[in-house]
Amino acid sequence: MSDDLEILLTNDDGIDSTGIRALHDALSEHANVTVVAPADDRSACGRSLSHEVEVDERELGYAVHGTPADCVVAGLAELGPYPDLVVAGCNKGANLGEYVLGRSGTISAAVEAAFFDVPAIATSLYVPVDDTPFEETEVTADEYAEATRVTSYLAENALEAGVFDHAAYLNVNVPLPDGEPAPIEITRPSKRYEMDAERNGGHVTLHDRVWDDMDPESLPDPEGTDRRAIVEGRISVSPLTAPHTTNHHEALDELADAYRSD
C-alpha cells in the first residue's frame, strides 16, 4: 500500500466504536487515512441523508451528527482530501444477503461513494451469538484482526489489479480470527429472506428469522453465497455495482404501449 494512497474511512457503528479504531490503525500504517464517521451509532439507517449536520473534531477525525451517507458526502465534498478509496467499517456484525444491501449503513456508505465514482470497500465482522443479546456482545480489538488484515490487503491491491474496473464496491464479511488466516471466497449475496411480524395489542414486533439457523449442517443458503462462505469460516467478498442494473423486458414494453389505449 502506497503511503500516498488517500483513504476516507467511515462506519455506521459510530466514531467511538472498536471496529473503526482497529481499521484506522491498520490502514494508517501505509496510507493517509481521514476519518469522517457518525458521532453515534447509526446502524441499519440505509442511505438516509440529512439536509444539515453538525460536525465535531475528535481525536480520530471528524464526528458527523448524521448518517454514514452524510459522512461520505461531507467527507468527499468538503472535509477531507479527495480519496482514492472509501472504506466503511469495520462493522460489528455481518452484512449478508441481498436484503441488507439497502438497509445497512455500512454498505450504504460504500454505495454513496460509488455515485461519486470513488471505489469502496465495506467490511463487516461475523459475530456468532448464543444466548447473549447481540447488543450486549463485546468484541475486542484483537477479534478484528482478520477483518483489518483482509481490508488492508484489498486496499493495497484491488485498485492496481483493476478490480474496480468491474465492481463499484466490495462487500466483505469476515469470520472471527481462528489461528491461520481464513481463505477468501468470491461470492454473490444470498437471496434468502425470512422477515415476519407479530401483533400484540397496539404493537407489531418485526422478526428477522434469517439468523435463526446459522448451523453449517442445516444452512439452506447454497454454495457460492456470502452466507454459506462465512458460516463455513471463509472470508466472503462480493463484488457489487451501483446503481443496480435494470432488467428490461418486452412484457413491460407491452404494458407501456397499451397504457394510453386502455
Image: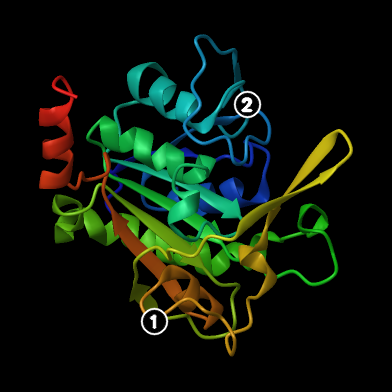
- On the image, the x and y values in percent for residue 216 come to 58, 85
The residue that mark 1 highlights is 223
Residue drawn 52% across the image and 48% down it: 89
Question: What's the CA distance linking mark 1 and mark 2?
Answer: 43 Å
Residue drawn 47% across the image and 80% down it: 181
Residue 138 or residue 193, whichever sits in front:
193
Above-or-below relation of 162 to 229: above
Residue type (three-letter) at the residue carrying disc 2: Arg
The residue that mark 2 highlights is 58
The quarter of the rendered structure image containing the N terminus is bottom left
Residue drawn 54% across the image and 52% down it: 90
Residue type (three-letter) at the residue carrying disc 1: Glu
> Going from the N terminus, do you reach mark 1 or mark 2 first?
2
Above-or-below relation of 46 to 197: above
Residue drawn 39% across the image and 63% down it: 189
- Which element is circle 2 on? loop
